[in-house]
Amino acid sequence: MPRFFVEDVSGDEIIISGPDAVHIGRSLRMRLGDEIIICCKGMEYRSEILTISDSGVMCRVLSCGKSKCEPNVRLTLFQAMPKSDKLEFIVQKAVELGAAEICPVLTARCVSRPDEKSFRKKLERLNKIALEAAKQCGRGVVPKVTEMISFNECVERLKACDIGLMCYENGGINLREAEIESGKSIGLFIGSEGGFEPDEAGRCADEGIRLVGLGNRILRCETAPIAALSIIMNLTGNM
């Protein structure tokens, strides 16, 4: 069943506007009486289409319930800026695997170092990728891709999480030993090509952020978040 997202729901009627309205009528060629799923803030509303136009699609709520696809942990992926279009791939897969938020980070070994203005141009596309991935995999919310932040900002945000983790290529505890529990907020920090500087890892360790390893093999920066997210979701019963 087609899935759409809105920012707010009030009462038993919902209006879908903008590009989604056009998509429903022209691309999907849906008709009055057809049913769709409308998602808002983790709730799913099974709805019937009442009217269709390019300016808006009016729907009547038939039933509602909490999304079963949302994990029982809130995981924020802090991803050091990779080269090329790797971040697009990482965003797509992180959304599919259950991340709640993706925060690009500028670290010492980042080869790609866009300024704020040029990165802002990419941000709209990254959030569109997150939206399409959320629709495809059945999420109840659309994870947000944030503005790029500094290493220091990342450390502070990791400290604010119930569980802060840095995947360090030079070793750390196994994720099974990181005391990862359901119902917690988790911050996961992944490096770019070349990983992290030793002093960055040292700073994180000093601040109480747990250094974790992903085995004896060195994973690419676009593989590591997929592996770590999958393990965490499995450990918390979300896979």
Image (tube, grey):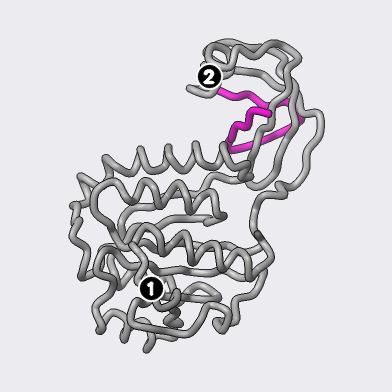
Residue at horizontal 42%, vertical 42%?
A: 127
User: Residue 214 or 238: which is nearer the viewer?
Assistant: 214
Dividing the picture into quadrants, the one containing residue 201 is: bottom left
x and y, in percent, of residue 210 in the image: 45, 82
Give the structural element (helix, strand or loop) at label 2.
Answer: helix
Q: Which residues are magenta?
A: 1-17
x and y, in percent, of residue 192 in the image: 29, 64
Picture layout, residue 214 above or below residue 42: below
Residue that extends furthest to the front in the rendered view of this protein:
217
Please tell me which of labels 1 and 2 falls first in the chain.
Answer: 2
Image position of 109 (left or right of 135): left
Q: Residues within 10 Å of mark 2 (few under 14, many from 20)?
A: some
* Amino acid type at mark 2: His
Residue at horizontal 58%, vertical 17%?
A: 28
Image position of 190 (left or right of 144): left
Residue at horizontal 42%, vertical 37%?
A: 128
Q: Residues within 10 Å of mark 1 (few under 14, many from 20)?
A: few
Asked whether 4 falls inside the magenta stretch, the response is yes
Q: Are marks 1 and 2 in contact (CB under 8 Å)?
A: no
Residue position for label 1:
217
| Image disc number at residue 23 | 2
* Amino acid type at mark 1: Arg
Give the structural element (helix, strand or loop) at label 1.
Answer: loop
Picture layout, residue 23 above or below residue 43: above
Quarter of the image that includes the C terminus: bottom right
| Image disc number at residue 228 | none
Quarter of the image that includes the N terminus: top right
Comparing marks 1 and 2, which lies closer to the viewer?
A: 1
Residue at horizontal 47%, vertical 59%?
A: 226
